[in-house]
Amino acid sequence: MNNIIFTVDKMFRLPDAGSLKAFADVALNDQIVIRGVRVLSGKKGLFVSMPQEQGKDNKWYDQVVCKTADTYERSAQAVLSYYRGQEACTNE
């Protein structure tokens, strides 16, 4: 799956929201958009979390799942690069 290109279409920064730093819309090959990707601050630094939805049992469930660690890492790299102000937010 090295032919997927991740780009950040939009980012909404939340400076006063505690550990939640931003929401992003991420495009895959300019064909599919994942809305609600989150940038969070944790004990080990910034990380990316895919959209989640709360079920009737009050547990949170991922709405988008990356099947490989490499795919997640490349998508997270695109989002975090954009968040840090690096406009070169695409990768292959």
Image: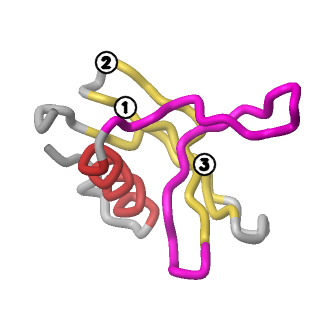
- The coloring applied to the image is secondary structure
| Residue at point 55%, 32% (across, down) | 35
Q: Picture quarter containing residue 60?
A: top right
Q: Residue 27, which numbered label?
A: 1
Residue type indicated by callout 3 = Phe
Between marks 1 and 3, how big is the CA–CA gap? Answer: 13 Å
Vertical side of 78 occupied by 42: above or below: below
Image-based side of 32 in relation to 59, left or right: left
Q: Amino acid at mark 1?
A: Ala
Circle 2 SS class: loop
- Asked if 45 appears above or below 7 in the picture, the reply is below
Dots 1, 2 in contact, CB < 8 A: yes
Q: Which mark is residue 31?
A: 2
Question: Circles 3 and 2: CB distance less than 8 Å?
Answer: no
Q: Position of residue 86 (x, y in %)?
A: 31, 65
Q: Residue furthest top?
A: 31
Which element carries disc 1, helix, strand or loop?
strand
Write down the quadrant of residue 52 in the picture.
Answer: top right
Chain part drawn in magenta: 42-67
